[in-house]
Image (cartoon, helix red, strand yellow):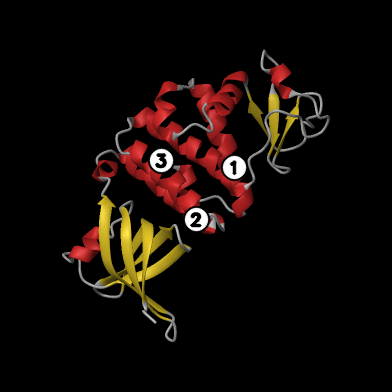
């Protein structure tokens, strides 16, 4: 039986390992998150090919007896060099990767997980500073749906009231502890809550599930963007049990 397997993969992380090698963390369509050693120093062709955010076909050599995996070849289909040309793009890509790693690749349906990541990174490669932040919260909102933890914004979690009737003025509140949305009448002020105004709710309902390439058509005011960022990072932080460092950038 061959010890080499071929995967469709995205490089999430590449870290030094030993004096001249590195360890890559990959999101694959076939097995989710895997880690492999890359041999060779900084001038190694394979080391350059396995830079973060590159994607394509990878060949992984496995030695099950020694629990050892090696990246033996990489046919890069997308280099995404544009992600390194703007600080905001770089940091957004890092936050996307950290989200995927912390959630263990989503725990299944890895082909969908890979598509969610690649679609976001492809759009991010040419995004301006303002769009980078919207792409980040957009990815978190879609990732929350993928994980099955996206709160329902259409119905109050307590009274069952149709919250669409509140879009003309009344506030909704996201209860961080319960991970659910409540109308003003049902929300307890003593709880840790986050406000969702009309703008943030409309953006999530209209733009939240669009493909990233269309996101430039849906802008947000600063207040709404702040609310959506607070909401999406809180949802994922609650699921992880800790706040990823990249969410504070």
Res 145 label: 1
Quarter-of-image position of residue 121: top left
Give the mark nearest the N terminus, 1 or 2: 2
User: Which residue is drawn at the image coordinates 48% and 57% (left, top)?
Assistant: 101
Q: What percent of the width, then of the height, locates residue 51?
A: 28, 57
Q: Earlier in the sequence, mark 3 or mark 1?
A: 3
The x, y position of residue 53, in whole percent, is: 33, 51
Check if mark 3's residue and mark 1's residue have beta carbons within 8 Å: no
Q: Which mark is residue 110?
A: 2
Q: Nearer the viewer, residue 185 or 50?
A: 50
User: In the image as oriented, which residue stretches furthest toward the top?
Assistant: 168
170 left or right of 214? right
The residue at 26%/49% (across/down) is 79
In this rendering, is residue 199 above or below 52?
Answer: above
Which SS class for mark 3? helix
Q: Quadrant of residue 169?
A: top right
**Residue at (41%, 40%) from the top-left corner?**
120
Does 109 appear above or below 173?
below
Looking at the rendered image, the disc whose residue lies closer to the viewer, 1 or 2, is 2
Whether tag 3 and tag 2 are in contact, CB under 8 A, the answer is: no
Quickly name the residue at label 3. Answer: 120
């Amino acid at each position: 039986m061959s010890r080499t397997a071929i995967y469709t993969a995205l490089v999430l992380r590449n870290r030094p390992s030993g004096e001249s090698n590195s360890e890559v963390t990959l999101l694959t369509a076939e097995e989710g998150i895997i880690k492999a050693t890359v041999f060779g120093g900084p001038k190694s062709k394979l080391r350059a090919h396995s830079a973060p955010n590159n994607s394509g076909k990878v060949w992984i050599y496995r030695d099950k007896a020694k629990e050892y995996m090696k990246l033996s070849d990489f046919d890069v289909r997308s280099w995404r060099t544009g992600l390194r040309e703007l600080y905001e793009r770089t940091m957004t890509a890092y936050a996307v990767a950290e989200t995927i790693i912390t959630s263990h690749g989503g725990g299944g349906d890895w082909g969908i997980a890979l598509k969610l990541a690649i679609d976001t990174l492809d759009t991010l490669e040419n995004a301006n500073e303002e769009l980078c932040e919207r792409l980040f919260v957009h990815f978190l909102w879609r990732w929350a749906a993928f994980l099955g933890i996206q709160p329902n914004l259409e119905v109050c979690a307590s009274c069952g009231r149709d919250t669409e009737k509140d879009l003309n003025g009344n506030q909704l509140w996201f209860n961080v502890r319960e991970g659910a949305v409540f109308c003003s009448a049902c929300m307890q002020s003593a709880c840790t809550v986050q406000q969702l105004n009309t703008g943030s709710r409309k953006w999530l309902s209209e733009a939240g599930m669009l493909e990233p390439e269309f996101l430039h058509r849906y802008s947000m005011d600063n207040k709404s963007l702040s609310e959506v960022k607070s909401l999406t990072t809180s949802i994922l932080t609650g699921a992880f049990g800790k706040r990823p460092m990249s969410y504070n950038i």
